Image (cartoon, rainbow, N blue to C red):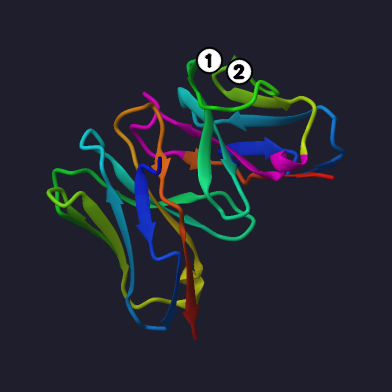
Amino acid sequence: QQQVKQSPQSLIVQKGGISIINCAYENTAFDYFPWYQQFPGKGPALLIAIRPDVSEKKEGRFTISFNKSAKQFSLHIMDSQPGDSATYFCAASGTGNQFYFGTGTSLTVIP
Amino acid sequence: DTAVSQTPKYLVTQMGNDKSIKCEQNLGHDTMYWYKQDSKKFLKIMFSYNNKELIINETVPNRFSPKSPDKAHLNLHINSLELGDSAVYFCASSQGVAGRTEAFFGQGTRLTVV
């Protein structure tokens, strides 16, 4: 059973555009929601994370929007750049002694 | 300095062989994990250890056996390798209780069973 559902599976965006990736979860015990970025041949690396006491967190061009009542959270990448082309994973944790990852979104930013 | 290092980076082996992947973290973290990433890039937890104690053992075949000699190391030994074991295996670590803070991942070990 997939604990965290992620969409879309792939995304193509023009340089300068906004990339939006969405995730949904069911377990209300989750209280930590990180986003990881993975480049080919590398391990995932933390991009930005949020806890449910806030509805939005921004770090540079990256913003997490969190909707606790809908059990959804999303990653927005403003002014997308070719260097942002990577696979993005949302995750959730707070119970179960592990991170539950979404299925990943392959982002391609076209110059 | 590499925070989480895995060796080897690539491993090609024949079916039926036994192999090990080593992982070391120099972050002083209490928790270490093994994740398997399949060809569709899905990340699935295999094991997690907290202070050398096994916390999670997901539905992984008995052929996979983790060993944590100290809290900075978590090695993965695989017996009787099968074609379906081909994947990228990631070691990770985090501070404190498993799943509560940022996880740092190694570069991965690409295992190919032929």
| A14 lies left or right of A71 | right
Picture mark count: 2
Chain containing the residue with disc 1: B
Q: Chain of mark 2?
A: B
Assign a secondary structure to mark 2: strand
Answer few, some or many: residues within 10 Å of disc 2's Cα (few below 14, many 20 plus, some between 14 and 19): some
Q: Residue at x 23, y 33 (%)?
A: A29
Is residue A98 located in the magenta-colored stretch of the structure? no
Q: Quadrant of the N terminus of chain B?
A: top right
Residue B66 x %, y %: 63, 21
**Residue beneath the point at 28% across and 52% down:** A24
- Give whichever of A72, A41 is nearer the camera: A72
Q: Position of residue B81 (x, y in %)?
A: 78, 32
Place of residue B15 in the rendered image (x, y in percent of width and height, measured from the top left): 84, 36
**Residue depicted at 85% across the width and 30% down the height:** B17
Residue A47: mark: none
- Residue identifier under label 1: B52
Q: Within the image, what quadrant is residue A92 found in?
A: top left
Question: Which label's residue is closer to the chain start, 1 or 2?
Answer: 1
Q: Amino acid at mark 1?
A: Lys
Work out how far the residue at label 1 is from the one at label 2, CA to CA, in angstroms: 5 Å
Q: Are marks 1 and 2 in contact (CB under 8 Å)?
A: yes
**Residue at the image position 63 percent from the left and 38 percent from the top:** B5
Examine the rendered structure and indicate whether residue B40 appears above or below residue B90.
below
Per the image, the residue denoted by label 2 is B68
Give the class, few, some or many, for how many residues have Cα within 10 Å of label 1's Cα (few <14, many ≥20).
some
**Quarter of the image that includes the C terminus of chain B:** top right
Q: Secondary structure at mark 1?
A: loop
In the image, what residue type sits under mark 2?
Ser
Image: B5 above or below B71: below
Q: Magenta part of the protein: which range?
A: B83-103
Q: Is residue B1 visible?
A: no
